[in-house]
Image: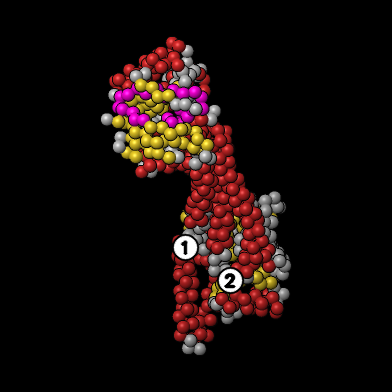
């Protein structure tokens, strides 16, 4: 009879105890997997969404709220800011590039964001179909937004479902983005002027032109200073901008006739006329990429000190948030560790506890010639099998729950949570396996110490 | 030629003599009965001969191998390859069925050998029955089958008939002897059952 055969029958005989150990191991591991998956997803999203955004400028209020609302689009903004007040900031010599954001409306919970093409460049977004917006009330939708090209819709006031609908003006979807794995996937993007027009605000000149002009001015200044190194850096910036601009121009040429189909000049004039008394233009925030790490600290300090605006550093605010959330994830990690420990103890008690009842069985095996080593292997193999089955079930359970959550929980579905395989995962699995083996080694060692002759003389 | 040589072997626990000094030899194909009252050390002597116990003094030699020179692993291997055991109690593994209890040996036991033994012992219709459902007599017969399953050169039997009636005693002994004859095996039985004396060609009596 093979070792595996003997162990199989033993596990089967101790059905409830074995199953309990297996399930405890599985639940402990599944919890650990869930914690690492959610944690990885959270950190990946923070990194991807916050890419190239060094400073955020918005209305006074909570700096964390400003970051969460403007960079991650998970909170309500601190307020609006007059566009005039940011004009000097975006021309600041330490500002490399900027992205305006105008928030206020949503469609079925997806935020409608007025912005510039630079926002798309920042996340290397590409069109899956259609074209970029060119005129007011044309939008492009992120990959997670359940909408089709050419579809028309009215935005609802507010950033969450349930607000008043702007029935008088409809947006039209002119493009759908490919999946970027960033916050863009769950946004509806349009020009800043579309959002401003809808809310009776004056329009603003093309932000991408301002951005480009700012870079040109800046490189001219640097030329004057004969700073070769900086000059090269700015040349790169211009190149990036121009590249983006070229794409847009190309898109414009191709699609300009389509725009005419959508909003003819009459219709556009009608929309404009509805907003008879436009107020001064306001935006929600600007996302700034600075030229040097030191500017990430100095620029917010200067803005906070000298203006009515608030500037926040996303890296700083998010590290604060991670510390706060870290306490929560550590609690889960601790809970998972405790469950795994209980599982290990259960394997230990399952094997050690029944050893007393199995002494007769092991004695007979020793008597007929099973070596101590083989008896040790039998008990250790039993522990190994229990923990391995537990790990197998735990992996399936953990990933299944994560996939289920990713498909059914709105926040995970829209942020396109995916399974990530990290070294940390393997470390957890190996640790559980190792702990299970250690737990079975003690009873296994004890089983080798059976005094065969003594046991045979007893009434076992 | 001597299969076993027992030279001045005695066994003590905490200075208390469990088995008095023994000197004898066992030849190949011999049928040896160790007689003696309860507590005289018959089981201890069988355990010493099979290597399950180490003598406090003296030497046991099996096929020219001195037990004192062999490692524990070597003695385990010797036992596995050469000895068959029939214990006073059946010591069956309860969660295994009869067939599995007989096939416990690490080396492959042929199906035909197992079914032949089950047939001879009248257990063929219960091969798949779990050991916990057997009567005392059936369990003892399974234990005998297990003792013979690996075709041992030496069969150690400790009180093999103590739980059996006259008819089954005779059947079991006939089976053991016919097996020994067929396989040129040696049998060493310890018993205080005087009914079986006449079956053995050689008897050793151990006194208290």
Q: Position of residue B174 (x, y in %)?
A: 37, 15
Residue closer to the observer: B125 or A278: B125
Q: Is residue B70 above or below residue A49?
A: above
Q: Any magenta on residue A188? A: no
Mark with earlier residue (2, 1) = 2
Residue lying at 47% horizontally and 32% vertically, measured from the top left: B19
The answer to whether residue A122 shows anywhere in this view is yes
Disc 2: which residue? A54
User: Relative to B72, is A92 on the left or the right?
Assistant: right
| The residue stretch that appears in magenta | B24-48
Q: Position of residue A329 (x, y in %)?
A: 62, 55
Residue lying at 34% horizontally and 19% vertically, measured from the top left: B201
Residue lying at 62% horizontally and 66% vertically, measured from the top left: A319
Which chain does the residue under circle 2 lie in?
A
Residue closer to the observer: A170 or B142: B142
Residue closer to the observer: A208 or A391: A391
Q: Any magenta on residue B37? A: yes
Instruction: Point out which mark residue A251 bears.
Output: 1
Instruction: Point out which mark residue A272 bears.
Output: none
Quadrant location of the N terminus of chain A in the rendered image: top left
Residue lying at 31% horizontally and 27% vertically, measured from the top left: B27
């Amino acid at each position: 009879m093979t070792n595996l055969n003997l162990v199989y029958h033993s596990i089967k005989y101790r059905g409830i105890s074995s199953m309990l150990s297996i399930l405890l191991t599985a639940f402990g591991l599944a919890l650990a997997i869930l914690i690492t998956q959610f944690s990885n997803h959270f950190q990946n999203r923070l990194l991807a969404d916050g890419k190239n955004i060094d400073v955020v400028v918005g209305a006074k209020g909570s700096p964390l709220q400003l970051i969460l609302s403007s960079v991650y689009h998970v909170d309500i903004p601190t307020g609006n800011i007059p566009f005039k007040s940011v004009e000097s900031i975006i021309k600041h010599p330490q500002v490399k590039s900027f992205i305006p954001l105008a928030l206020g409306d949503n469609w079925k919970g997806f935020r409608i964001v007025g912005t510039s093409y630079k926002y798309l460049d920042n996340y290397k977004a590409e069109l899956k179909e259609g074209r970029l917006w060119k005129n007011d009330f044309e939008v492009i939708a992120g990959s997670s937004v359940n909408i089709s090209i050419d579809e028309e819709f009215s935005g609802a006031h507010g950033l969450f479902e349930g607000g008043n609908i702007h029935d008088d003006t409809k947006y039209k979807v002119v493009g759908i983005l490919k999946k970027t794995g960033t916050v863009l996937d769950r946004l509806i993007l349009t020009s800043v002027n579309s959002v401003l027009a809808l809310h009776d605000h004056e329009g603003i000149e093309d932000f991408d032109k301002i951005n480009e002009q700012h870079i040109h001015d800046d490189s001219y200044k640097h030329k004057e200073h004969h700073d070769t190194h900086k000059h090269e850096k700015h040349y790169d910036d211009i190149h990036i901008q121009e590249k983006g601009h070229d794409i847009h121009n190309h898109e414009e040429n191709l699609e300009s006739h389509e725009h005419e189909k959508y909003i003819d000049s009459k219709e556009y004039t009608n929309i404009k006329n509805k907003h008879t008394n436009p107020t001064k233009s306001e935006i929600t925030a600007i996302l700034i990429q600075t030229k040097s790490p030191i500017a990430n600290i100095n620029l917010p300090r200067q803005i906070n000190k000298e203006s009515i605006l608030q500037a926040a550093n996303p890296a700083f605010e998010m590290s604060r948030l991670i510390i706060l959330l870290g306490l929560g994830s550590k609690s889960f990690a601790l809970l998972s560790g405790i469950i795994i420990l209980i599982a290990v103890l259960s394997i230990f008690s399952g094997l050690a506890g029944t050893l007393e009842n199995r002494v007769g069985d092991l004695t007979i095996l020793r008597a007929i010639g099973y070596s101590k080593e083989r008896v040790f292997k039998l008990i250790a193999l039993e522990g190994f099998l229990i923990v391995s089955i537990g790990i197998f079930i735990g992996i399936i359970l953990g990933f299944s729950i994560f996939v289920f959550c990713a498909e059914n929980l709105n926040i995970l579905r829209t942020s396109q949570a995916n399974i990530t395989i990290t070294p940390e995962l393997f470390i957890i699995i190996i640790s559980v396996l190792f702990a299970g083996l250690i737990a079975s080694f003690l009873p296994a060692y004890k089983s080798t110490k059976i005094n065969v002759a003594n046991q045979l003389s007893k009434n076992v | 030629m001597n299969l076993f040589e027992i030279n001045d072997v005695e066994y003590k626990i905490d200075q208390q003599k469990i088995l008095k000094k023994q000197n004898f030899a066992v030849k190949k194909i011999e049928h040896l009965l160790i007689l003696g009252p309860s507590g005289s050390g018959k089981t201890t002597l069988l355990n010493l001969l099979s290597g399950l116990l180490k003598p406090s003094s003296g030497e046991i030699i099996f096929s020219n191998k001195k037990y004192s020179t062999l490692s524990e692993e070597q003695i385990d291997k010797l036992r596995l390859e050469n000895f068959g055991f029939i214990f006073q109690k059946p010591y069956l593994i309860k969660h295994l069925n009869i067939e599995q209890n007989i096939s416990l040996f690490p080396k492959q036991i042929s199906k035909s050998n197992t079914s032949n033994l089950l047939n001879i012992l009248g257990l063929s219709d219960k091969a798949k029955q779990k050991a916990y459902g057997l009567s005392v007599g059936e369990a003892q017969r399974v234990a005998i089958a297990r003792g013979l399953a690996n075709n041992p050169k030496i069969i150690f039997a400790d009180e093999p008939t103590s739980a059996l009636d006259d008819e089954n005693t005779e059947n079991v002994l006939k089976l053991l002897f016919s097996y020994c004859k067929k396989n040129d095996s040696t049998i060493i039985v310890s018993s205080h059952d005087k009914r079986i004396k006449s079956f053995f060609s050689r008897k050793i009596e151990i006194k208290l």
